[in-house]
Image: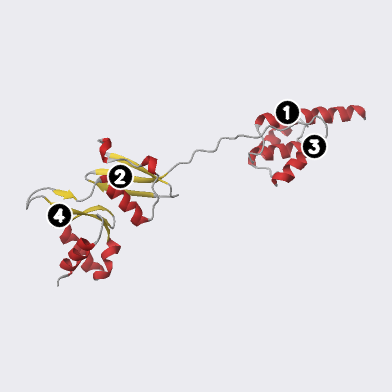
Amino acid sequence: MKLEDRMRQSIRRRSGTVVLRSDVAALGGRTQVSHALDALLRGGELVRLGAGIYAKAQRESPAGRVRLLGSLEAIIREAAQKWGVILHEEGLPRDAAGLNEPALVVETDTPRISRKLIVDGKRVEFRSRRRKPRSYKATPLAIPTVDVARFVQELARRYKVVYTPNAMDQWAETVTRLAGDDVRADSTEDLLIALKRAGKISTTDVAALTINHLRERKQRVRSL
């Protein structure tokens, strides 16, 4: 039996509509498989959707158009399943939606995915879904007016947060020094910055703790 006939039988026995080249690669050598796939494409039994991916089809008449044997949604689902891609259901289009756009973006819950198909002339692009950043909902802190430095240190210890200066911090310190300002942030202010960056306290908490800390530090200097 010719490879083309064996491939035809293998594809017909498979459930679903989508066929990967890897599904039939074991039937023959690389060149032989390519020739057999090309023959099925010419005969209207397959339609190429993209590199190495095909869909079952049928020619309506000897000289007629080739019709896919699966709906757009079914092809998208099968292609995703064969690729191991998890579709984001809310972003999955339905045929009944009357999609007339020439291009379609399908969101997936699989990270770092970028795949493309051409289905009945429509470009279908699979993209990783952009996750919205979580909104910060901090538990209101009981802001102390004394021993602020100790409170901030305990807070940082609880959340295992340490301050590591970044390029922006170094730039700000340089600008301040060049401007002749000798005021420098102490370790408590640095920890407040680190806690805010880590999302452990809100901007309001930072402002209140900083004000109380500076006020307490100023009072301590006066008492000396």
Could you tell me how far apart the alpha carbons at marks 2 and 1 are, in whole angstroms?
51 Å
- Residue drawn 22% across and 62% down? 11
Q: Name the residue under label 3.
A: 149
Residue with the most extreme right position: 224
The secondary structure type at the circle numbered 1 is: helix
- Residue drawn 73% across and 40% down? 191
**Given the image, on which type of amino acid does mark 4 rest?**
Gly
From this view, report whether residue 78 is shown above or below residue 172: below
Could you tell me how far apart the alpha carbons at marks 2 and 3 are, in whole angstroms?
57 Å
> Taking 30 as reference, is 60 left or right?
left
Sequence order check: which comes first, mark 4 or mark 2?
4
Q: Which mark is residue 44?
A: 4
Sequence order check: which comes first, mark 1 or mark 4?
4
From this view, report whether residue 30 is shown above or below residue 16: below
Classify residue 212 by image quadrant: top right
Sequence order check: which comes first, mark 1 or mark 3?
3
**Given the image, on which type of amino acid does mark 2 rest?**
Val
Q: Mark 2 points at which residue?
A: 124
> In x, y percent, where is residue 96?
26, 38
- Residue drawn 73% across and 34% down? 177
Q: Residue 208 carries which label?
A: 1
